[in-house]
Amino acid sequence: MDQTRAPIYEALERFKQMRVVPFDVPGHKRGRGNPELAALLGHKCVSMDVNSMKPLDNLCHPVSVIRDAERLAAEAFGAAGAFLMVGGTTSAVQSMILSVVKRGEEIILPRNVHRSVMGALVLCGAVPVYVDPAGDDRLGISLGMRLSDVEKAIAAHPGAKAVLVNNPTYYGVCSDLRAIVKMAHDHGMLCLADEAHGTHFYFGEGLPVSAMAAGADMAAVSMHKSGGSLTQSSLLLTGPAVHQGYVRQIINLTQTTSASYLLLASLDISRRNLALRGRQEFARVLELARYAREEINRVGGYYAYGRELCNGDSVFDFDQTKLSVYTLDVGLAGIEVYDLLRDEYDIQIEFGDLGNILAYLSIGDRPQEIERLVSALAEVRRRYGGRKGGLMRQEYIEPDVAATPQEAFYAEKESLPIEDTEGRVCSEFVMCYPPGIPILAPGERITRRILDYIRYAKEKGCQLTGPEDAQILRLNVLA
C-alpha cells in the first residue's frame, strides 16, 4: 500500500472544497456559531470538526476512507487489522479485553496494570489471575513478569482465555514478550499487549520488540503518546487469529457514534509520518535520551536508569527513550522533584511518584530542552536536596484478593473513614495518577501497609484519584 497517502485527511480537504451547507451537527456550523472557539482553535480546525457523512465514511461501519486508513495503519504496524480509536487507549485496552473474556472467564495479567484493565474487568465480569511482577528493591518499581511465574499461572489456570502483558511498563521495563506469546499459544490462550507507551517500538532500531512482531494477538497502541497524534487518539491492532468483525462489534458497544474527525485525521497523518520518517526520528530520540541519561547521572545523587537493569527475565529489555530517574538519594521524593520542576522552573515532566520521575521523550523534543531539564535537576539538587532519611521507599504491595472486581464494585457497600477500613474489602479504586496503576482495586482487602502508603502519598502531594470521596478521607467497603 502507498504509505504516503492519508485518506481521511485527503477526504476532509476534498470536502472543504465542496462548500457544503451544513444542516447537521455539530451545532457550531464550521465555527460560525461560536466565534470564540473559532478564534481559539483557528478556522481550519473548526471547519474540519464535522459529522460522519457519505464522503467521509463512518467509524462504526467504515467502508471507504476510514477503512483505507485502517488498512494503511495495519500495514505500517505489521498487523492483520487495525482500528482507529477516539476514546483514548483506555477505550482500546477495554475493547481488547472485552473481545476475549466474558463473565466468569479467567485472564492472566500482572497486577501493575493500568486502571483501564481493571475497569474492563468490572464491565465484563472476568476473573483476574494475577502474576505478581518482580520488583527492584532499590528503585522501588515493579518490573516485568518472570517466565516461571507466567508458567505457574498457566498451569494452575489452564482454562484462562488470555495472558496480558505490559509492553513496556510506564518506567520502560519490558518482559520477554516473545516467550510469553509462545507460552500462551502453546496452551490455547491468546496474548494481549498494553502497548500504551510502546508506539515507537514499531518504527525504531535498537528498541524492544513490538507486540505484533512478537506474535501477540492484540495490542492497544497509544498513538498520541509517542506517536505524535492528538490527545485521545489511539489504535487497536489485531493479529491473524482474531475475528475483526467481532472486535468491531465490541468497540461499538462503548465507543462514540460521533467520532471526531480531528482525532481521526491526526491518526491518519501521524501514521503516515511514522511510516515515512519514524525510523530516523526515533533514532534521534534515542540519542537524545542517551545523552540526557549520561548528563543526569553526572549531576550526582540522581540515577537515570537504563538497559543495565536487564537480567534476561523480569527485565528482559528496556525502552531507552524512557528517561526514568530515581530521586531518593538526593533526599527528595519523585513527586517533590516533579512539583519543583513545574513550579520553580516551568518544566512539565510526565509524572513523579514516591521515588522516581519520568521525563517523556519523543519526536517533538530538541536538545535545548534536554539541556534545560538537566540544568534544572542540578539546581534542584543544590537548592533543595538533603538527607535520604525519613523518605518512604515506593514498593509493590501484593494484593489480597477477596472478590472479583465486578462483584465488589456492584455489591452493597458502606462508606467509612479511611483509617477505619483496615481488614475490610474495598469496593472502589484508589490510584496515583499518573501512572494510573491502582493501589487498591475493587475486591482487594485493605491492609495497614496500603493505608500507610496512601497517607504518605497524600502528604507528599501525589495526585490520588478513584474514590467517590475526592479528598480520600473515606473509602467505600463491602457491607
Image: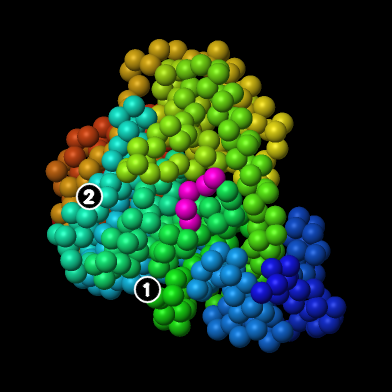
Residue 129 higher or lower than 454, as above or below: below
Residue visible at 22% across and 49% down?
A: 148
Viewer-closest of 120 and 74: 74
Q: Where, by quadrant of the figure, is residue 58 drawn? A: bottom right
Residue visible at 33% across and 18% down?
A: 390
Residue denoted by label 1: 99
Q: Which residues are magenta?
A: 206-210
Q: Is residue 404 magenta?
A: no
Q: Which image quarter is the C terminus in?
A: bottom left
Residue 447 higher or lower than 65, as above or below: above
Residue visible at 63% across and 35% down?
A: 288
Residue denoted by label 2: 149
Q: Where, by quadrant of the figure, is residue 262 drawn? A: bottom right
Question: Tag 1: residue type?
Answer: Ser
Q: Secondary structure at mark 2?
A: helix
Task: Give the left or right position of residue 270, taking residue 201 as reference.
Answer: right
Q: Secondary structure at mark 1?
A: loop
Characterize the magenta stretch by its predominant secondary structure: loop
Task: Give the left or right position of residue 419, taking residue 259 as reference.
Answer: left
